[in-house]
Image (cartoon, rainbow, N blue to C red):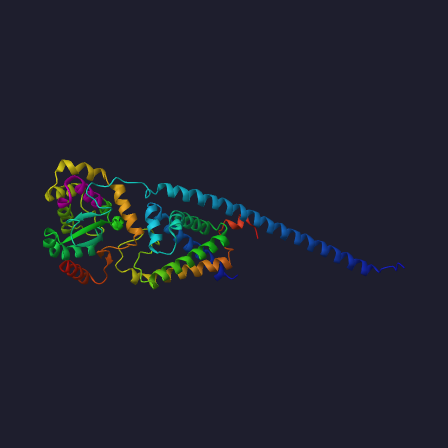
Amino acid sequence: MGRFGVAAGVLARVLVGAVWVVAGVLKLPAPNENVRAVRAYQLLPESLVTVVGHGLPVLEIMVGVCLLVGLLTRIAALLSALLLVAFVIGISSAWARGLSIDCGCFGGGAGAVENARAKYPWELARDVGLLLLSGWLVWRPRTPLAADNRLLPA
Amino acid sequence: MSKKKSTATRRAESQAASARAAEIRAAQERKERRRNTLVVTGVGVAVLAIVLVLFTIANGKRDTTAAAGSAPTGAIGYAVPAGPSSAPVRVTVYEDFLCPFCGQFEQASSKALEDDLTAGKVQIRYHVLTFLDRSTSTEYSSRAANALAVVLDQAGPDVAKKFHDLLFAHQPAENSAGLTDGQLVGYAVEAGATKADVQGGIADRTFEQWVKNVGDQASKDKVNQTPTVFVDGKLLSGSMDSLVAQVEKAVAAG
């Protein structure tokens, strides 16, 4: 792996990791808002809505911290990619069904979003970008400054 | 049969043997590393999974949605009613006291519906939501929603309707601090409530849980934005002007 690859790996870890941590922490204060945000997509059955609403912020913070410190990078990146695929499906499906909802990506839950439809493309672009970076880390999980290098010597 | 090997052959054979031994050692080390990686990964994933489950449960415990909140006297389900239940047309409005579009809707519709309300031709049911709590530094949406419930509980639906209209007439801007509790009490008194009756409930947020439950029920009823307007259970859609026009038309038709 050349110098570009090394730099890209660290950058991807820090960027994607930071986004997850921020997204998760912003959701922590209001668990019921997250449940509503999940419910607003009208995709999951009610029994799952609550579990996902309560668990997603925790999972996001954990994936984010793992990526930031480079712990179990490949698995964290894989989870990150899977979550982003789920979000992309959720947002595009909300868009396609004509729902006008706040994506709830960074907390805030369902909201008074008059211009939700104008925001969907940006949210999708952001998630696809993060998905690509996560995919890179699944492919090339070895990066400098990572806990993995001590735990799992190559 | 043993034919003497030359020195060169023996040397070559011993070199090959030690190379094979090194290869086997390397393979063993690779295997060990792989096992090591698997064990560390497995333990790590297990620990993280436990953390995830524990914190998810903790998050669930912090969610008071399931708690029953005592409802204000005079509420119909999760709505604050204006006008008699016997009215031929029922308009259901989901709104947030901070939402500018709700303010526009109220401005355009409240005057138009005033006479119909007094004539008993329409009942309006207000479901007050708190989506925009984060758009003020003081959770204005929740405080205002609670204040409306307190006024309804203490002074009845007519005063509550006046209070509701006053709050929209003096709607604070998004990203401001919102109206203070003192101002809320002031408008309640202006609407006709007694100060002593509403002051405590507004300060202590007596109906905080009920307000949360209003929002939760709205979410279950697939209402995810404000204003959302139903006429006799039918969802209206269109621009703000068209919403108001549709409501007026429905009420006029009876």
Residue B242, above or below A20: below
Highlighted magenta segment, given as a residue range: B143-159
Q: Could you say which quadrant of the image residue B53 lies in? A: top left
| On-image quarter of the N terminus of chain B | bottom right
Residue A64 position within the rendered picture, expressed as x and y whole percent measured from the top left = 43, 51
Q: Is residue A86 visible?
A: yes
Question: Which one is nearer the viewer's eye here, A25 or B187?
Answer: B187
Residue B245 position within the rendered picture, expressed as x and y whole percent measured from the top left = 16, 62
Question: Which one is nearer the viewer's eye here, A43 or B11?
Answer: A43
Q: Can residue B97 be seen in this view?
A: no
Task: Identify the residue at image location x=40%, y=52%.
Answer: A20
What main secondary structure does the magenta stretch of the protein show? helix
Residue A107 position within the rendered picture, expressed as x and y whole percent measured from the top left = 33, 51
Toward the right, the furthest residue is B1
Residue B208 position within the rendered picture, expressed as x and y whole percent measured from the top left = 25, 41
Q: How many labels does the image show?
A: 0
Question: Which one is nearer the viewer's eye here, A26 or B98?
Answer: B98
Q: Could you say which quadrant of the image residue B237 lies in? A: bottom left
Q: Does the magenta stretch include residue A138?
A: no
Q: Does the magenta stretch include residue B150?
A: yes
Question: Which one is nearer the viewer's eye here, B150 or B88?
Answer: B88
Task: Identify the residue at image location x=38%, y=58%.
Answer: A90
| On-image quarter of the C terminus of chain B | bottom left
Residue A137, above or below B44: below
